[in-house]
Image (cartoon, rainbow, N blue to C red):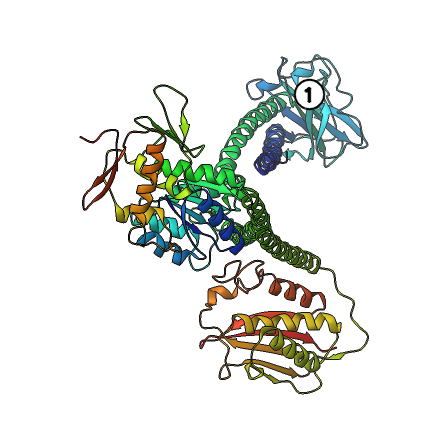
Amino acid sequence: MRVLIVEDSGVLRDSLSQGLREAGYAVDSVADGKRGLIHAQTTDYDVIVLDWMLPEMDGIEVVAAIRAKKLPAAVLMLTARDSVDDKVRGLATGADDYLVKPFAFKELLARVQALARRRHNQPSPMLCVGPLAINTDARTATTLQAHGPAITLSLTPREYALLCYLAARTGKPVTRAELEEHLYDDSSQVFSNAIDSAVAALRRKLDAAGCPPLIHTRRKIGYVLKECEA
Amino acid sequence: MNSIRRRTSVLVAASIAGLLSLGGLGMFLVVRASLAQQFDDGLLARAAALQSLTDAKAGKIEMDKTGAVMPWYHQGGDAEYFVAWVRDRDHWRVLAQSESLGANVWSEAGSSPRRVGVADCALPDGRAGRSLTAEFTPEIDPEADGEPNTSVRTTSPGDDLADTSVNVLTDVPVVRLVVAQSTAPLDRTLATIALSIVGVGGVLVLASIAATQWAVRRGTRPLVTLSASVATLGPDTLERRLDLGHLPSELAPVAGRLNDLLARLDDAFARERRFTSAASHELRTPIAELRMLLEVGLSRERTPERWEQTARDGLGVLDRAQRLTEALLRLSRASEGSQAALPDATIDLSAVLREQAARALDASGHDPSHVSIDAPRPLPARIDPALAASIIGNLIENALRHGDVSTDRAVRCVGTSDAAGTSIVISNHAPTLTAADIKHLFEPFWRKDAGRDAPGGFGLGLSVSRALAASVGASLEYQLSADKDVQAILRFRRP
């Protein structure tokens, strides 16, 4: 999942970026509203974390422009404005959620996860594909065995993000470019075979956990996650 | 509660009732006087009739008083009275009296001397009445002859009154006539008229009260409407204005002033909301920053170097929060409205100007050619030197920080002194500043398109500077010229 943070406080911007990256998100961050809108228009973000009071263009103007351009990203507004009128105004303009500063990082993470699920029409935090069960709240992936205990996969944040993204689109082919856009941020150095390497590593871990092949290659397209290849 | 409508209704109704009462009383008095005059005229006519029936012939004074001529003198409930005397030398003798008196003698009518004229009296039957006393000389019948002074015949009570005569010895007989009539019919008529006036007046008073209430209610309807509109105004509806279109000319100025007041209140509330919102934002952001630093730092194991960086970042946040708190305290103290103590001696502001320009240039890293100073010595002002340095230093820092500054477009500091006082003008080129921005320059936390990490501070400096200037009786204002040169004008009155 790829997240854009638009926040003019450098400390807050860096902390949020670090926390979300460590939670497995690909994160871009900018310091003003105008650049935030440019990023939102040029990249398919899953969630945009948007401060209200921004230089150049305030958060309300940015979210109004995002909705006017019918961009699908979910928007979480951050602000110190805590009055009901302010919240109503933010949500009425097009924000999907609203978080008042100061806030707990866990709460922000939970809201970002919920918005990402909603963005991909996935109401439940549990994703199940065959014997594979992914808990997006606990950020765990488990393979259920017919006989014996369930095995929890040990995945890197990138592998977990890849698995989640494919699982959210179970049965639908996902292109390499799309995977790159949602798994890597602007600061990442993405090699041409980065996606293939990550998929290969993920397949190995699934196989080692006794999971039947779930990730299938679509030649010249990308990959699809589903229970059995027809 | 004191009600204009009720008070006006009561006052108008009381006024109408009073006027109607006075009018009724006046009318009654006029009618009574008129009827009394008619009554007296009636008595006079009676007296004239009796006079016409009296003549002197052959030494006798006679009065022909047949019942047909004078039926109203017969005895009865509404009987009238008369008595006629004739003076015979020094004695008055009864010539004739009305049948209504019967055999009685009306002693009161004969009391002598009696003033000629009309007066109230008590009638022989005890009723109240009015009497006319007249004296006249009977006409002498030229066809009669004889000795007028030789015989006297007088009537006595109970005599036949068809014809009475008195022989008198005087050459010029004088007859005194008293005619009296009951005033009961007149009193009854007056009582009827008085009752009618009171009745009609009462109805008119009641009708006038109702009409007054209706008129007052209708007349004060715009006032009630205005009052209801004003009652709905509150802190949440300050953007609303009173509709002047339907108001009468007396209320339109009041509503206009209220609208002006609402506009000022709306502006003040908006400023207050912006300040509260900005202060809330500025105060909550450092807390959010520290919380994120620590929560993200603690979310997994970190290297000592990483923790050191987190601590440095945290100290930076705290440093900014401390500066913000101190700036807010300075603004709060400076805005309390108290006057700063003025020193006894004046200081030279040109020296302060030069010192602060050098300090600001040094702190900002600008080239010395980026500030030009034109300040002849001395520029006298009564102000604490530290206070003057704070104000002037802040203005120069702002010009260097936000202005389009270069060697060709230097910040200009010009000082002048004249009879009115001392002025310092600090100007710089500000291509992005608009006329609308000028009114926000002194608003706390106002920064034109600047984020928290921009080098513009908190947006409190100008608010503090203006409050400090006001505390020593000086003024600070900004002006923007057409070619986008913004001027900070600091004026001190002549010490």
Q: Nearer the viewer, residue B369 or B337?
A: B369
Residue B428 place in picture, x, y as percent: 52, 76
> Which image quarter: residue B444?
bottom right
Q: Residue furthest bottom?
A: B376
Q: How many marks?
A: 1
Residue A41 place in picture, x, y as percent: 32, 53
Residue B210 place in picture, x, y as percent: 52, 30
Q: Chain of mark 1?
A: B
Q: Quadrant of the C terminus of chain B?
A: bottom right
Q: Which residue is mark 1?
A: B97
* In the displayed structure image, the side of residue B382 where residue A33 appears, left or right: left
Secondary structure under tag 1 reads strand
Q: Is residue B103 above or below residue B139?
A: above
* In the displayed structure image, the side of residue B89 where residue B352 appears, left or right: left
Which three-letter amino acid code belongs to the residue tagged 1? Gln
Residue B110 place in picture, x, y as percent: 77, 25
Q: Residue, x 24% and y 33% (percent of image)?
A: A171
